[in-house]
Every structure is written in structure tokens, then in C-alpha cells.
Amino acid sequence: MSVHNDTPTPDLSSKAVVQLQHLAEYLDQIEDRLQSFRAIATRRDDGIDFAFPFGRASFELSNGQVEIRARAGERDDLARIKDLLATAVQVYGKQDSPQIRWTGDFCEETKLPQFREMTVMEITQLTPAMRRIRIAGADLGRFARFGGMHIRMLFPTSRVPQPVWPTLGKNGLAAWPPDDRRPTPRAYTIRRLNVEAGWMDVDFVLHSGDSVGSHWAETALPGSTVGIMGPVGRPVPMDAEWYLMGADETGLPALSRMLETLPASTSGVAFVEVADEGEVIHIDNRTSIEVHWLPRNGTAAGMDKRLVNSVMAVKWPVGLACFGWFAAEAEGASIIRNYWRTELGLGRDQTLAASYWDRMKAGSMATGGLAKA
Ligand SMILES: Cc1cc2nc3c(=O)[nH]c(=O)nc-3n(C[C@H](O)[C@H](O)[C@H](O)COP(=O)(O)OP(=O)(O)OC[C@H]3O[C@@H](n4cnc5c(N)ncnc54)[C@H](O)[C@@H]3O)c2cc1C
């Protein structure tokens, strides 16, 4: 069996026995999802093993019952694996109404390991429509791990000005308070993280219309509090030789972060749609990826076709390890995802086209399995 060389010796473990009558119908999807979180999967006659860089997991089938095991060397890693497994089972096994209840190490824990309460430190207006907010909190090390760049921010609202934060449920997932005490989630990117100093920067697009995240960013003051959960999102491989990227302003924080952290030898092309020239920001691009700005100049956000057309017009080079990354409004993301996956026949391991917002609805992608890929 091939395993991650750096998988730690797993001496902590948890187990859940779950009725999943139709597992055979969705095991491929669970496998695919966990692989996209860096698991190496190995099928057996009676189940499947997963080796993550931070621990292991297995599904063992017998008589319609499935024994799910999570093993890791550290508490946070065990919790991460339980969360990934439980989320995958809940997302794909809906038809079996899975009842997951973990037993074993730390199963009595109620503190949600991926949650932190954060306090606003500093606010910087980067451009007329982009506001950077530095938030501070304790013990941020996990946000530099697991390969996820994003967080789910939990906002107070006028209806719930003092929300009750989620705790850890017996199923390894977040347990939420009743609606009248519940914070409102939205997905954002960790633009910059300083674990030692205990802060992270989040760049907020300030947009019109009734909103939660944008409204919070416009009204937050130093000392305001907000909850975060994470990191979330599929890890983007950092070892491709050539990248094709496309983003509107909501994907710009993630795109900037990648251009600042990918190896200098990386080449490729990136397109960034912004409202106008005034929204162009400086990116400390360490790579040879060429950045092209596409100002909408009056066309409404989510209505300009040039981003999608520009990305589709690029020919993928032959003979290089390539990766396509796209983050923008839902319709464009769906066009690019179909084009890459169906027309070009590229796999999930070579592409990530994610809907970051939806002009037809509020709060898109904030609660479920995050961005589709
Ligand atoms: C993984 C991920 C990472 C993200 N990272 C960032 C980030 O770092 N910075 C960031 O600003 N956004 C980011 N987004 C996008 C952000 O989550 C959405 O824009 C979200 O809808 C904002 O919530 P809201 O409460 O402000 O607006 P909502 O309450 O969700 O929506 C209210 C109304 O505003 C519209 N709307 C929402 N977003 C926009 C927009 N950008 N422009 C114009 N109209 C809009 C909606 O269609 C709706 O009509 C990310 C999304 C994902 C999935």
C-alpha cells in the first residue's frame, strides 16, 4: 500500500458504526472527495483505507453496516479526519440519513477544534471596494495546516447581534445553536496569516445590496468580534509547473496569495476581473505567471463574459504539469468547470473551478461543502 511518508504514527483513534445501505452507490464520490483533501485511497474487498498526510482512516463494510475509523497522532489531526469523514458521509450518503456517533479518543470533547473567536485589530481601505480587516485570535497554527486557504466567517447580524458560537457534536461536526442565537456564515479567504503574532488579514469586497459579510466589513470597528471556522476548501496543488487562473474580485485574495507563495519557477497566465482601474491592486507576484486585469468599466458584477472567454481561449501546454484554478460568480464558474472537465476531459486533480458568489442568491456556498469543484 502506498502511504504518505510523513503520515505520523497514529496512536489516537475513533470509530463510528453507521448504517449505510447504499454505500456502494456513493463510495466513489466519498473516495474522490477525500482524495481531493490529499488522501491516498486503497481499496480492499471489504472496504477502503485512506492515508492523509496527517493520519489515516478506513471504511469497513459488513452486512449493510459500515465501521468508520479515524486515526491520527494528534488531537487536532484526529478531529480534522473525523470532520472530513463525517462531512463526506453526510454530503454523499443523504439517502441513508446517516447517524454518526463517534466513540474513542476525545469523543466527549465539546469544544469545536476548528473554531476561534477573533477580534478586529486594524482596518485598511485598499481600494474603493476592497477593505482589509486584520483579525486577531489565539492559537492560529491550524489555519496554516491542512492546505485550506479559506475560512467560514460567523457574523453577528441585526437579528442576532450576540450569537452563540457552535460546539462540537457527537458526529464530529459543528453543533449549532437554535436559529435565534445562530451566527450567519459566509466564506472568505485568509489573505495573510501570522501565526506567531496571532492575526490574519481578510480582504472584503464591499458590494451593494442587503448583505451580511459586506455589511459587517463596512461597519466593523477595532474591538468588534467575529467567529471563524477553518481552514476550509480543497487544497490547491502548489507543485504544478504551469497554472491557468481566473478570478473576479472575490477570488482575488486567494489568487494574490497563490502568486505570492508559488515557487518562482512557476509559469502560466492569470485573468482578474475587477470593477474598474481603481480596483487594480499591487500583487507581490513571485512567479512568472502573467497577470491580465479585466476592468468591467460599468458592466455589473457577474455579467461580464470576458473573464470566462479569456480563460477558455487559453491553450493548455502539452508536456507540463498544469493546473487550472477559477473562482468567481456561479454562472462563470459552472461554464469553466464544464469546459475543463467535460470538453477538455481534465480531472479533479488538474482543476478547481469554484463558485464564490451567486448573483441569484445571498449566502451562496457559506454552509455546505463549500466551493464545488
Ligand atoms: C472559498 C471562498 C472564498 C471566498 N473569499 C472571499 C474573500 O476573500 N473576499 C470576498 O470579498 N469574498 C470572498 N468570497 C465570496 C463571498 O463569500 C460572497 O461574495 C458572499 O456572498 C458575501 O456575502 P455577503 O453577506 O456580503 O452577501 P450575501 O448576503 O451573500 O449576498 C447579498 C446580495 O449580494 C450579492 N453579492 C454577493 N457577493 C457579491 C459580490 N462580490 N459582488 C456583487 N454582489 C454580490 C448576492 O448575489 C446577493 O444578491 C469567497 C467565497 C468562497 C466560496
Image (tube, rainbow, N blue to C red):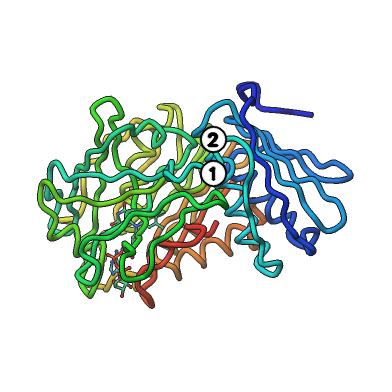
Q: Does dot 1 land on a helix, a strand or a loop?
A: strand
- Figure check: 208 above or below 48: below
Report which residue position mark 1 lands on: 323
Q: Residue furthest bottom?
A: 360
Q: Give me the C-alpha separation between circle 1 and circle 2.
A: 6 Å
Give the image location of residue 38, x and y in percent: 60, 38
Asked if the residue at tag 2 contacts the one at tag 1, i.e. Cβ–Cβ closer than 8 Å, the answer is: yes
Q: Is residue 180 left or right of residue 41?
A: left
Residue 278 is drawn in which quadrant?
A: bottom left
Q: Does dot 2 land on a helix, a strand or a loop?
A: loop
Disc 1 residue type (three-letter)? Phe
- Figure check: 288 above or below 156: above
Give the image location of residue 155, x and y in percent: 27, 59
Residue 301 is drawn in which quadrant?
A: bottom left
Give the image location of residue 220, x and y in percent: 14, 55
Which label was assigned to residue 167?
A: none
Which residue sits at x=56%, y=42%?
A: 107
Q: Nearer the viewer, residue 115 or 204?
A: 115
Q: Is residue 272 visible?
A: no
Report which residue position mark 2 lands on: 240
Disc 2 residue type (three-letter)? Ala
Q: Quadrant of the C terminus?
A: bottom right
Which residue sits at x=65%, y=62%?
A: 342
Ligand 1: quadrant of the figure = bottom left
Q: Is residue 25 left or right of residue 314?
A: right
